[in-house]
Image (tube, rainbow, N blue to C red):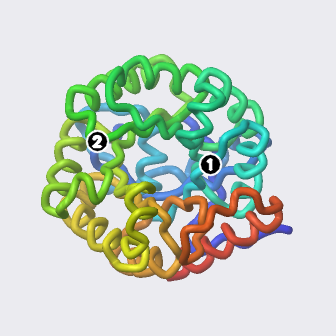
Amino acid sequence: MERKQPAGLPHLPLGVPRRGPLQRRSFLDGACRLAAGGSIAGGLLAIFAPPAAWAQTGMQTHPASARVLAQLRTGFTFQISVDVATLPQGLAVAGAALKAGVHIVEMGTPLLKNEGVAHVVPAFRKQFPQALLLADMKTMDGGASEARGVYAGGGNIIDFLALAGVDTAKAVCAVRDEFRRNDAALPRLAFADILVPHQGPAAQAAETALRMIDAGVDAVGVHLQSDARRVNPKLIESDYLGEMARAIFARVGKSAPVQVVGGLHAAQAKRLARAGLRAFVISGNLGQPDTVTRYNLPPAEIERLVAGFIAQVGGA
């Protein structure tokens, strides 16, 4: 069943090169409507084009990546976290979520560890040739080699842990830049995940976000740890994640996109959207106000729940 996109979500393909001076840290805003199959439509370049005021002289960047970053800042983007154990189930969940309207497919850490990066990333790229693919690597060291594995397999984004520190962030970004130089068509991005409550309080987490951006990452995530929310369900029931996300967004939101992830439900996301945040990750609860994992639901039901989350939050 065809779903209507919420306002501000253009139907966008994987990034296509466009010429022009683009400054890297100025472009960070919202969405690449991704669908399985189809060809890259050059006629949609205008949708990705940043506002004229953003086209500044200075450091030249990778246009395909800059267009995705520009969309990440001003439009809503929704990511599905495919945290399952097997490749067939992962492909099924991703396919349902793409039909529902997500913009980024996250190949989750359990899937990558159980099936292997060299197996999972190429399989997702083959199945979803136009999708924007993120690998949630939970990298704590060896950032260069892990980033290389993701990009070489056809992934667009590596997500590593901000806990790894500035040296790892710079190593990941160096490999990202290498792949940008070698391929003009594919967006290549690096996100740093800030784990809370471990990296709290809010002021400390915001400083971590700033260090990651200064090291060169394209976006930061505010991630409510799954183990922590299992031990203390009140972390989900309260506005703890929202408080952390708003504090980090206030500090770095003008410089980089801020994603929110960690059992997020629609009501929480709507409040954050009203505060200006635009990038949300849908976890295994599929946007419901509980900790129940729903990846085993039929694809049509996954599609319905994900589409509902997008419609509610995108219209906030």
How many numbered dots are placed on residues in this image? Answer: 2
Q: Is residue 86 above or below residue 229?
A: above
User: In the picture, which quadrant includes the N terminus?
Assistant: bottom right
- What is the x, y in percent for residue 307? 68, 70
| Alpha carbon separation for disc pair 2 and 1 | 21 Å
**In this orientation, does residue 145 appear?**
yes
Residue 19 in sight here: no
The three-letter code of the residue at mark 2 reads Ala
- Helix, strand, or loop for circle 1? strand
Mark 1 highlights which residue? 82
What numbered label is drawn on residue 162? 2
Specify whether 19 is left or right of 239: right
* Residue 215, position as x, y percentages in the image: 21, 35
Task: Mark 2: give few (<14), some (14-19) or many (20+) Cα within 10 Å.
Answer: many
Q: Is residue 170 above or below residue 314?
A: above
Answer with the quarter of the image where residue 222 lies. Answer: bottom left
Tag 1: residue type? Val
Image mark for residue 20: none
Task: Please state which of residues 7 and 22 is positioned toward the viewer in this rendering.
Answer: 7
